[in-house]
Amino acid sequence: MITFESLGLSGKTLQGVLAAGYTTPTPIQAQAIPVARAGRDLIGCAQTGTGKTAAFVLPMLDRLSAEERRNGSRRARALVVTPTRELASQVEKAIRTYGTFTRLRSLAIFGGVGIQPQLKQLRRGVDVVVATPGRLLDHLGRGSLDLSRVEVLVLDEADRMLDMGFIHDIRKIVAAIPARRQTLLFSATMPKEVQALANTILSDPAFVEVGGRRNPAETVMQQVCSVASHQKMDLLYHVLDTEPVDNVLVFSRTKHRANRITRKLSKRGFAATVIHSNRTQGQRQRALGGFRNGTFKILVATDIAARGLDVDGISHVINFNTPNQAEDYIHRIGRTGRAQASGHAITFVAKEEERYLRDIERHTGQRLARKVYADFEHDAEAKNGHHRPSEQARKHTGRADANRQQGRHRRRKSVRGSQSARRR
Ligand code: AMP
């Protein structure tokens, strides 16, 4: 059996990972850790949920803690760049967890929060910086962060950083780091833009890949549901009524729609909250914290805001709209079925979204199962063959109301929050 010991991790890092409760490396960890420990550059093709964070954090801590004293001045020796604030803060938390037994100091740097605390910490000195590109460049511009001692550079979720238009920022950041360094690049997908970036900033990289480049985590049951656009909200209530949902992430393409969905859910007594880029950092943290601790059972999110969310136990991902990029689909459903847990992803497809569904199926090389909620009543105008409920469903419409009542009752116990959560 592969163990963390057998991957060659040394004392303090090993102690850290074991204290975190992990005994067996995930496949990406088993492949990436030995390569990274040997000092090689690495391209890791893995989605969130595979354990990829520890795959780069552990060898990085191992390397830095072996020579903790060398850096008397405590200038940053490792830099992790992430696309979003949430991911930066999660990665930094992982560093602190796994690095409990080292004396290394880490700092998350991102925008949307005051710069003063970051400046203060930087003056005290840090060993590892985890940052989003914008605020990182701010610090470089002010001269408050010196990257001239960086030995390890990690680009996390590189595909998403390029999607978000960070390519020039990344190149500027890379230019501020010594050429003699180890570079680790992680990406859920490998479009040619990511390859091109890797070709210019990595040197003779090893390539490790888990779960197939295009296949969403195998632990996720994936289904699509045909529905007319104007009935999506009703279908959402119906799914929440009838599925054994515990913790639900609902994706919306726009911020505006995300707000509307959340308002409607809350009005019906669901404990729902929302996260998107127009919300302040404080609002986002409260939403995420409440979702993590169970105050909110439903988190409505846009793609960018949900990127890199590490919340355990998301039972369902519901795509309120069909993602128009196959990569977004993979990222979205990767929020459930994390590590070894199993999850369920349901995608709502309106007639005008069917072409996106075809793209997703082409991209993943997999036909997604069609799900018909027999007792969900589609509008007559939608019954043009595409949205028609089954014969059996129509025969049973008389029972549908009773079923819905039962479903509602179940929901009260599951996704509906406590009174206090509802009042929030
Ligand atoms: P990541 O892909 O890095 O976002 O990690 C996904 C989840 O897997 C996180 O909640 C980690 O805490 C968890 N995890 C990381 N490594 C392991 C491991 N070796 N065994 C079990 N769970 C792990």
Image: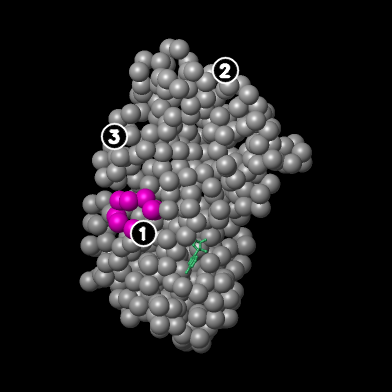
Residue range corresponding to the magenta coloring: 211-218
Q: Are marks 1 and 3 in contact (CB under 8 Å)?
A: no
Which label lies toward us, 3 or 2? 2
Q: Who comes first in sequence, dot 3 or dot 2?
A: 3
Which three-letter amino acid code belongs to the residue tagged 2?
Gly
Name the residue carrying label 3: 358
Residue shown at 52% from the left, 55% from the top: 310
State yes or no: Cβ of the residue under disc 2 lies below 8 Å from any atom of ligand 1: no
Residue 46's disc number: 1
Instruction: Give left or right: position of 128 versus 194.
Output: right
Mark 2, secondary structure of its residue = helix
Residue shown at 40% from the left, 78% from the top: 1
Magenta span includes 212: yes
Q: Are marks 3 and 2 in contact (CB under 8 Å)?
A: no
The percent coordinates of residue 368 (x first, y second) are 35, 39
Nearest to the observer: residue 360 or residue 170:
360
Residue 356's quadrant in the figure?
top left
Which label lies toward us, 2 or 1? 2
Callout 3: 10 Å neighbours few (<14), some, many (20+)? Answer: some
Name the residue carrying label 2: 398
Which three-letter amino acid code belongs to the residue tagged 3?
Arg
Q: Please identify the dominant SS of the magenta region.
A: loop
Q: Who comes first in sequence, dot 2 or dot 1?
A: 1
Nearest to the observer: residue 341 or residue 44:
341
Is residue 99 something one can see in this rendering? Answer: no
The percent coordinates of residue 234 (x first, y second) are 55, 25
The percent coordinates of residue 411 (x first, y second) are 65, 36
Residue 34's quadrant in the figure?
bottom left
Callout 2: 10 Å neighbours few (<14), some, many (20+)? Answer: few
